[in-house]
Amino acid sequence: MNTRVIAVADNKGGVGKTTTAGILADGLARMCRKHGDDANVLIVDLDPQGNQADIFGVRADVLAERLCIGNVLLEPGDVQRLQHNIISLDREEEGWPRPNLYLLPASRNLEDVTQDLVVMTTMRTAKRSGFDLDTVLADALSPLLGSFAFIVIDCPPKLDTLKRAVYNFADEVVVPVKADHVSLVGARQHTDDLYALQQEDSRRFKARVTLVVPTMMPSRQVLSSQVVEQMQAFYGRDLVSEPVPESVYVKEAPAAGGQTLFEYAPSSAPSRAYAAIVERIFNG
Ligand SMILES: Nc1ncnc2c1ncn2[C@@H]1O[C@H](COP(=O)(O)OP(=O)(O)O)[C@@H](O)[C@H]1O
Ligand SMILES: [Mg+2]
């Protein structure tokens, strides 16, 4: 099975990365089920806040088992450890069947591990031992390639240390941009960073921006549609999805016992917008 690795990333916080990554993974898993194959989808949380566990209502299990991607980044090749840190998101007994959806969660531990990684890169022995910060994600997670149809990565706002590793491992980048001018400036910086990496080494940093998603679009605001037009002018019309409306359903869903938006409010306006985005990404 060919695995598509999709990073959801932007330089700014609060633009809808975590929301979009969770909904995208849930939606892609649904599409796989609809198409009758038993292909699995994995969401990788790279933000030490670990909010993907909240979105899917599994925070207690993640804490109890001390699951975290930080446990695996320093031990590439330990497949058993990798599998142990992945949790099923299926909650069929509670009415939320997600048989083919999995999470590699994050916790505060990821912060410490990231610092260790920085120290390791500055050590003179790093090169000799084969340690390379650019490939740390690929080295740790490549045993999963082939087992999942999609791996969706929820990136933290400050990607600094792991930025190169994300763009080395990911094939595609989805960029959520809040429909206001300041966020658009942040998104441009983010794509400039990515293009700079590609110029440095286009094979090593193979990730390409495949979709820009205008998020939290206020229903009646001329200004926001101007921002969407600016996005289209900057990225090209084909790269910008339809905007996701601002809606209280998006905030309510995780608070309602960790339901996804598609479970909580399937026919709501944001659900319909995200369903179209999922379909577009699924069809590549
Ligand atoms: N379409 C939307 N309508 C209303 N609130 C939203 C929408 N998308 C995201 N939010 C809310 O905005 C806040 C920030 O979103 P989040 O996905 O955590 O952003 P990030 O991961 O980029 O920091 C969260 O409280 C989330 O529930
Ligand atoms: Mg986030």
Image (tube, helix red, strand yellow):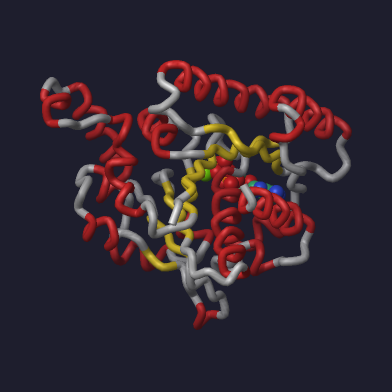
* 145 relative to 255 in the view: left or right: left
- Residue at image position (29%, 37%) is 136
* 190 relative to 220 in the view: left or right: left
Please identify the residue farthest to the bottom as the structure is shown.
93
- Residue at image position (51%, 79%) is 92
* 186 relative to 205 in the view: left or right: right
Using the rendered view, name the quadrant where residue 160 is placed. Answer: top left
**Residue 228 in sight from this viewpoint:** yes
Residue 182, percent from left and from top: 68, 25
Across the whole image, how many numbered discs are drawn on residues? 0
- 210 or 157: nearer the viewer: 210
Q: Is residue 125 above or below residue 51?
A: above
* 177 relative to 272 in the view: left or right: left
**Residue 50 in sight from this viewpoint:** no
- 18 or 30: nearer the viewer: 30
Residue 233, percent from left and from top: 76, 23
- Residue at image position (48%, 59%) is 41
Residue 23, percent from left and from top: 60, 56
Residue 180, percent from left and from top: 73, 31
- Residue at image position (46%, 54%) is 43
Which quadrant: the N terminus?
bottom left
Q: Is residue 247 above or below residue 193?
A: below
